[in-house]
Structure formats: structure tokens, C-alpha cells
Image (cartoon, helix red, strand yellow):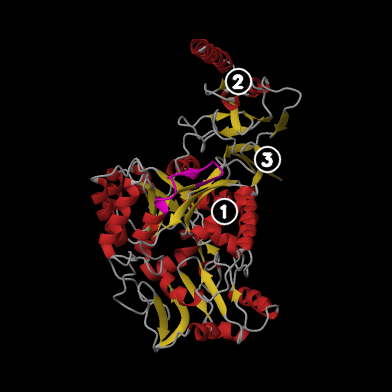
Amino acid sequence: MREREAGRGWFAQKRRALVSSALASLGLTFLPGEGRAADPIVPAEVILRNARVLTVNAAGDTAQAVAVAGNRILAVGADAAVMALANARTRVIDLRGATVIPGLRDSHLHTIGAARDIFNVALEDARDLDAILKALAARVATTPPGEWVIASSGWHEGQIAEGRMPTRGELDRISPDHPVFIPRGGHVAVVNSAALRLAGITRDTPDPRGGVIVRDGGEPTGFLIEGPAMNLVRRLLPLMSRERLTEGLARFSTVLAGLGVTASTEPGATPEEIGAYMDLWRMGGMRHRVRIMQRATGLADVRARSAVMAPNFGDDWLRVGGFKYLYDGGVEGAWTYDPYQIVEGEQTDPAFRGKLLGPAGGDAEALEMFRLAASRGWQFQVHMVGDATTDHVLDLWEKVAQDHPIADLRWAAMHVMLSRPASLDRMKTLGIRVTVQDQSVRLANNMLRYWGPERAAWCTPTKAVLDRGIPAGAGTDAPVAHWNPYVALWWLVTRKVEIRGRVTEPLGPDMAVSRQQALRLYTMGSADVDFMDDRAGSIEPGKLADLVVLSDDYLTVPEDRIRDLRSTLTMVDGRILHEA
């Protein structure tokens, strides 16, 4: 019996190979293997034809048509050859020359944060301070006395004409009695006097370890820098129920699918937040794929969570992939070798070099945390913005690598905003991956003010990363920045930014990359960081059918119109989830 089954298996493989060879001569490509998605005999359920298909395969091939069966890509090739796989039930979509790309994969998107923001005061489209204050005042008017008014975090003062945050006094005028909390990204917030009173923050309150309470003449201004300072107020905010968070996740996942983002990495979630994701997964409500990095605050987190879950546990819709650690701050608090510039009313210490946010047990605990994760087969991704932070973490990782193959575990450096050339060389030697994001588009205003023009121009040296052959993925860091992937692609190609609501000339143009490189970063590059490169990230037979049809030709549209691209059709797992 076993010999007969083996013979049948051999015959089936031979049959597939022969059919694949014959159809390849017609311009089709197939991946021999098991199952419907790789078997050319199976008829296509959906065919996208008369298109310009950017496959993002190793050769950078283009094609005319894509056939899909089940949740897999069945074939890619010329129109006539792919149409040979159609039958009476096949849905054939004539794209009339439109461009098809692999589903976009955001390698660093705080979907949890964006899900919460859906219920807060939206500031993402504000272009001046008056619009911000009016939006907050409108929420104050409909909020019961004494309850919190909370803004979304996915905005930046660089997008508004005044180029600054609202002041405590301005917030007091529109909300004298309601406490107001306005986060900007994940590293800065401004609050009003009512919020300061509730938090007990006075001139005598010391700066918490790793955070800064900005003061004027000793009095708190309401401006809080980095999580430890923000948490003095944030701990008082009303908790969002798990049901509410799950609703927000469902809504934001739909937003992303509509943009053509078919997968993202959640860079740091708590067990409770992972639970909300699992609820959405059980309900079948996910519209894009998510790989979660568990938020680690120290050794205890890694020890406990790695003991009960296996690395990359889950399926292709939802997977718990590794751990994330936040090792320094953002633009206003990254740990750097050289001091920050003076910024009146915000950064007044001429010796300030940012904050290193290592665990309470210092380097000894951090080293044990990293070693434990590596010994148990887990990926680690670490937030490192400042140049001094990067070298500090690499010092630790080089010790870990002496005993554990962290290159095989695809450990990744997040952001690498100010990482120096020598640090990038060390990453290459260690086999480290990198994830880059377009924070500069809206944060350049503060990069210039806090770091100065030289560091701001170097920020996120994408070309230097690629020139060294360091594997890298791209994304947005939303809602620290906006989640629109086409703005990120535009920035990667042009290095243009927004300052006070206006697009500027390129900032650091020598770090720009080609359109093909940018698209690869956002597809195969991100898939590689996520251990998905064998089944996603390119349009190739056998891979998951995650596809996007664009509103214009990505390769030929004028550079400044890349940011205006849109998805007219998004397919995830073989299902069309968005069609405009």
C-alpha cells in the first residue's frame, strides 16, 4: 500500500511538472507543489487581466495577468495564457492597463493605538492651531462635566501652520473644567491645568526616570516628554473595554485594507491587547494580517510569556511573532552622543542628550532578557532612535550572538534614525534586520529644532542601509505618523517632508532610494522581517493572494503624485475586501 501511494505521489508530481512546463512556454509561471494553489489543473476563481503586474520577484519581472484559486496565487503571466485557466465560474476583471502590486506590508504600525484613536478627537487633518482648538472645544461641549477629553495621537505640530503644540493656557481657555490629554505620537503630550491638578503635578514634582516635565520658571507648562512623564497623567485616563478595543481594531483594519495595506506588524502589545486581537480573529473580523510583537518591559515579561507560547504562534491572519523593547525616546528624547539644541519653552537644558530607557536592572538584566529570548527561539525587535542608543544595544547583542544565532532569528533594529555608518556596519556583521519608517514627513519640524540640520538630514539613512545589503522592511510607525503607505513610499523616493503644513525640498536627498527599492521594502522586505517571505510579499504562484490594484502607474507617475496613489481594489487571502 505504501509503495502504491508513493508511486501515485511520484506520478502526480511528474504530471504537475509536465503541465507546468507546457504552460510556461505560453508565458505562465507555476510553483510545483501540493494543494490547489500550486496545481495548474485547478481552474482560476478570479483573474486580473490586461494589467501591469509588478511581481516584486527576485528578477523584478512584470506580467499582464494574475490567476487566483482559493487563497493562493495560481499563475502569473501573459493574458492569453492566464485566461486558459478560466471556466464559466471564473470572475474575470479587466483592469484596462492598471498597475497591480503585492499587498503592502507595514513593518511597524501601532494598530492598537490607531484603534483607540478612532474614538478620540481626530486631529490628523488639522492644518492650523485654530482647527485643533475648535475640534477639542466641540468635544468639550458634548462631554459631561469633569470627564476627560482625549485627542488622537496620529498628528504632529509640523502639519500645522504654527509649527507648535497648543499651550496649557490655550487649552485652559477652551476647557477650564474638563481635563484634556493631547498625545502626539507615542513620546510627547500636552495637558491643561485641570489634568495637571488631577495628576498632582506641581513645581515640586520631580522628573520621573526616563521622562521630562517641561517647566517655565519652575512651573509645569503642561508639556510632557516620554512615556514615564506622560504616564503621570495617562494612568488616570478611563480604561477602554476589551469589546470597545476590538471594535476599534475591526474598524481600523478595514481602513487599512481600503488603502491596500494587507499586513502589518504590531510593535508592542500587552496580553490584554493581544486578547482583543484574538477576539477579532475568532469573530472573523480581520481585514488585514497582523504579526504581534509582545511588549517587554524587562526580563520578567520575557521569562513568563516565552514559557507559555511558542515563537510565531498563530496562523497567517494573526501571529504572535516575538518581543519588542523600547530602549530610548523619540525626536524629543532619543539618547544621543551630542547634546540637543535649545528649543525655547520646550528644551532648555544645553547638556540634554535624551533618555536611555533600559530595564530597571540595567545592562545585566537587559543582557539576560535578550539571552533568554534567543535561547528559546524568539525574535527581538528593539526601538533605537539615538546614535548612542544604537551602539549601546549592539554592544549587548554582540555578546548574545556569541552563543545564539540571532541572525537566524531575524532580530531587528527599529527606526535607526540616527544610527551612524559604523553602527550600520556592525548590524551587517551581526545579520540584523532593520525597519525604516517615514516619521520625517511630519516630525522633520522638530528634528530640525531639536537635532539641527545635519542630524535631521541623515535621519533614517535608508540608502545607507540598502547599500550595505542589510535586509530591511518599511512602514509608517502610525499613529506616530500617518498610516497612508503612499506617503511613506513618496518619502522613501523623494525625501521631501512637511514643515508648518507645507511640503519642502528634500531633506537628506542622498538617502533617497529608487521606486523599485521602496516598493520592495514595503512588500518583500517587510515579509522577510516577519518570516513571511516564503509565502507573501511578491506576486508569485503558490503565495498568498494578497494583491492591490493602484489608481495610477507607480513606476511612471510623477514623483510628487506617488503620495496621491490609492487602492482601487484590495484582495486579501483571495477575497476582494475593497473595490472602488
Q: Quadrant of the C terminus?
A: top right
**Could one spot residue 286 in this view of the protein?**
no
Within 10 Å of the Cα at label 2, are there few (<14), some (14-19), or many (20+) other Cα atoms? many
CA gap, disc 3 and disc 1: 22 Å
First-in-chain label (1 vs 2):
2
Q: Nearer the viewer, residue 369 or 209?
A: 369
**Rendered view: 286 above or below 116:** above
* Kind of residue at badge 2: Pro
Percent x, y for residue 123?
60, 68
Of helix, strand and loop, which mostly describes the magenta segment? loop
Percent x, y for residue 28?
58, 21
On the rendered structure, is 461 left or right of 198? left
Which element type, helix, strand or loop, lies under badge 3? strand
First-in-chain label (2 vs 3):
2
Percent x, y for residue 106?
51, 49
* Kind of residue at badge 3: Ile
On the image, numbered disc 3 is attached to which residue?
Answer: 576
**Rendered view: 74 above or below 331:** above
Disc 3 and disc 1 in contact, CB within 8 angstroms: no
CA gap, disc 1 and disc 2: 36 Å
Q: Nearer the viewer, residue 573 or 278?
A: 278
On the image, numbered disc 1 is attached to which residue?
Answer: 277
The magenta-colored residue range is 305-319
Percent x, y for residue 42?
64, 22
Q: Given this view, does label 1 or label 2 mark the residue nearer the observer?
A: 1
**Rendered view: 274 above or below 431:** below
**Could one spot residue 306 in this view of the protein?**
yes
On the image, numbered disc 2 is attached to which residue?
Answer: 40
Residue at the (50%, 74%) spot, across then down: 235
Residue at the (51%, 52%) spot, across then down: 488
Residue farthest to the front, as pictured? 1
Within 10 Å of the Cα at label 1, are there few (<14), some (14-19), or many (20+) other Cα atoms? many
